[in-house]
Amino acid sequence: MNTEIAGIIAMFVITLLLAIPLGKYIARVFGGEKTFLDPVFNPVEKFFFKASRIDVTREMNWKQHLYALLSINFVWFFLSFFILTNQGWLPLNPDGNPSMSPDLAFNTAISFIVNCNLQHYSGETGVSYLGQLIGLMYLHFVSAATGMAACAVLFNAMRERQTSQLGNFYNYFLKSCTRILLPLSIVLATFLAFKGVPMTFEGKDTITTLQGDTVKVSRGPAAAFVAIKHLGTNGGGFFGANSAHPLENPDYSTNMAEMIAQMIIPFAMIFALGYFLRRKKMAWAIFGVMTAGFLLLAVPTVIFEMNGNPAIEKMGIAQHAGSMEGKETRFGAAASGYWSIATTVISTGSVNSMHDSSMPISGAMQLLAMMINAFYGGCGVGILNYYVFIILAVFISGLMVGRTPEFLGKKVEAREVKIAAVIAILHPLLILAGTALASYFAAGDTPMGWWFNGNATGWLNNPGYHGFSEMLYEYTSSSANNGSGFEGLGDNNPFWNITTGIVLLLSRYLPIIGPLAIAGLLADKKYIPESAGTLKTDSSTFSIMVFAVIFIITALSFFPALALGPFAEYFTMF
């Protein structure tokens, strides 16, 4: 077997083997059961709750959960926005990086709060150490914990036979930070520091290269930042090149560790659902659908990246290492292609190669991973997105067999289906409307384009199909809370900062509000015991139905746009 392929398989298998016991542990944490970390974190959590005067024994309904979630996120936005717009004069800025402009700070603060980390700046020159740690890395923890806490509310709603009380948001939120994210981050950060990822508050270092040139190399507290950026499926890079940078990702072992880190919690949350509900078969059914979708995206990408560029082949130039433009030789084409799909499926958005240099079909697979936005997904929110498709599949299946749609003993009625349909439609609406608007401005010097950017055509370094793909990718990444990009796009200007910021807000909170509203409404309904006529939602038949619903909605929504971008670009290569 090709050693590059063996490395990919090893990464996936190790992640799966670690995710199963982690999922069981997460279920125990959210279920309030005893864990081996209780002696360490019980006193810490009691201190925080006492200091903040939060009564964690007071349970909340779904509306109260959403109020707590949205209000605390609102506070974090202003904290981050203040630091980023004032970091030039604040401490921990040894390199003298300037404060951000209001529109860039607006975009960056929103992006990190919503777990997207869309970066319209370069970390070495755009953010101080205070900005990296308090303005951004702090948000790595709390944004991931927000998604996990919302997922815990969903777990509760699915487990209870009839209730309006679904636990305490602040309890789930803090435990997600202390019991799950923090311990794993300490382990990974320690490993990365020993492998050479810097962890210092010193400024740039002066290095003499083998050629005798003197260069300034940025440093900083990167090991801690990189650990939580992957474990929290955040993805924002400490350095501009993200995990392609040798000080973020020095070698193949760190590449494997970071790859496993960004996939392990999304995997584990699926198994946590099975343990929490005591429905392991359902968890494996969900994991099977997600894995099938993941492989359908990852396999073509790896093949196309390993085969190389056909335009270069036509020139008689052999590409034994595959398509290596925009990739690091220490990782290779296969691992880079695998990472590109994992990071877009998981919604991490970190990169170890430049997606803008990928083969067109690979770019299409990366776009599809974010357009579907329901295979594994980010910390917690992957389950929430998939839940919407479950509700739609239950409704459609009920209509097909002439029975009242039911899910886990609760009737799925018009109100729940309407909410699910709106959430399913919102994602393509934000992507396609944003891309259409940007395409209009980029097509000529419109008055609005001049007001936003001076000359809108300056956005694109690549004309034609690839330029369209760059704009499509930016809004797709924003709506999927991903953060990766086709970086041929000039996106640090008011137009892109403001419009993607709005997309980020809508695409983060509405897809959380919708599933929690559905779950809360269903939890409050009378429980109906299963009978011979009950639709089995953990069966292979229903799994195929869910997959079909996902495929049909994605195809109808996005294939025309993909045909105008990466698919058209692919055929021009011949």
Image: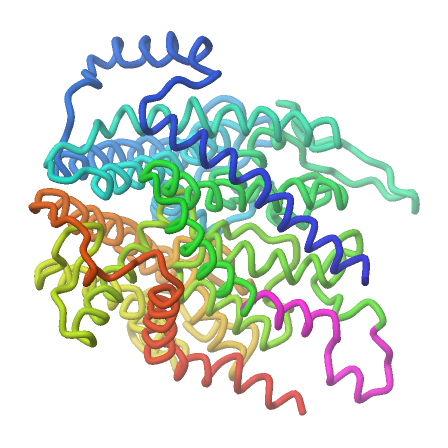
Residue drawn 59% across the image and 64% down it: 355
Looking at the rendering, the stretch of residues picked out in magenta corresponds to 297-319
Please say if 51 is above or below 233: above
Residue drawn 29% across the image and 59% down it: 536
Q: Position of residue 209 (x, y in %)?
A: 87, 42
Query: In this rendering, would 179 be left or right of 246?
Result: left
Please say if 302 is above or below 9: below
Query: In this rendering, would 467 be left or right of 52?
Result: right
The chief SS type of the magenta part is helix
Q: Name the quadrant of the N terminus.
A: bottom right
Please say if 442 is above or below 11: below
Quadrant of the rendered image containing residue 55: top left
Of residues 98 and 392, the one nearer the viewer is: 392
Of residues 455 and 309, the one nearer the viewer is: 309
Residue 159 falls within the magenta-colored stretch: no
Residue drawn 67% across the image and 92% down it: 574
Residue 431 visible to an observer of this rendering: yes
